[in-house]
Image: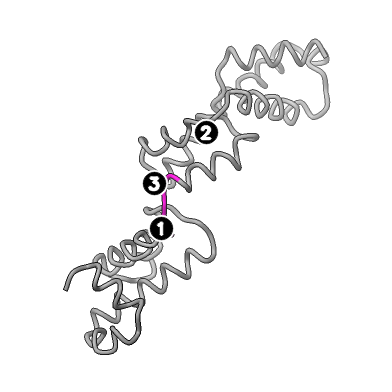
Amino acid sequence: MSEDRYILSWRNPEDSADFFKTEKDEEYRKAAEKAMSLLLQQDRTKKNLQDRLYRAGFSEKASAYALQYVMHFGYVDDLRYAQNYISYHKGERSRKELRYKLMERGVPPEIIAEAFSGYEEEAEYEALKKMLGKKLKGKSLSELDYPAREKAAAYLARKGYALPAIRSVMREWDEK
């Protein structure tokens, strides 16, 4: 039986009345149900869903079937996940940090690059200004001594912002 027939038989109870007779078939169905319930809680990447199914105790084949099942209906899409993640966090994180977090979640680099295609540099600049304001806690840069300024710049650099952008924002902040 082809994989598409297998998926469609699970969707249509009258077609699958005698299909899920073996223990293996029952595990596949339960894996697909678990995948669907996990996706109801939150959007997930392919890797994240696969890891969660594995931790739930499903075999590798059952997990692969469940992944194929949810991907067949478009419930798992790493590009959509990456675009949503970037649009939600772009005002508070650097481009480098966003890329790292997505790679940590199992999104392939080529999909991350495609997701960043609509990313504006202004968003990163605004996030940098927001992060500097948070770090300074309402103080002005003129109140800080040189080591404190450098410490703030090093903090922002560790967060993934480029040094020229940090210096530019600090100059702008100092002029205010």
Q: Name the residue under label 1.
A: 74
Task: Check disc 2: other Cα within 10 Å, few if <14, some if 14-19, many if 20+.
Answer: some
Q: In which quarter of the image is the C terminus?
A: top right
Residue underneath mark 2? 97
Q: Is the magenta stretch mostly helix, strand or loop?
A: loop
Q: Which SS class for mark 3? A: loop
Q: Position of residue 157 (x, y in %)?
A: 57, 22
Q: Closest to the observer: 49 or 136?
A: 49
Please state which amino acid type lies under the numbered disc 1. Gly
> In the rendered image, which residue does mark 3 sit on?
106
Looking at the picture, does residue 70 appear above or below residue 1? Answer: above
Q: Nearer the viewer, residue 173 or 10?
A: 10
Which badge, 2 or 3, is on the more N-terminal residue? 2
In the displayed structure image, the side of residue 20 where residue 164 appears, left or right: right
**Residue pictured at 63% horizontal, 24% vertical:** 122
Region rendered in magenta: 74-79
Left or right: residue 145 compared with residue 73: right
Q: Residues within 10 Å of mark 1 (few under 14, many from 20)?
A: few
Q: Which of marks 3 and 1 is in front?
A: 1
Three-letter amino acid code of the residue under disc 2: Glu
- Disc 3 marks a residue whose amino acid type is Gly
Tags 3 and 1 touching, CB below 8 Å: no
Snapshot quadrant of residue 15: bottom left
**Alpha carbons under labels 2 and 3: distance apart:** 14 Å
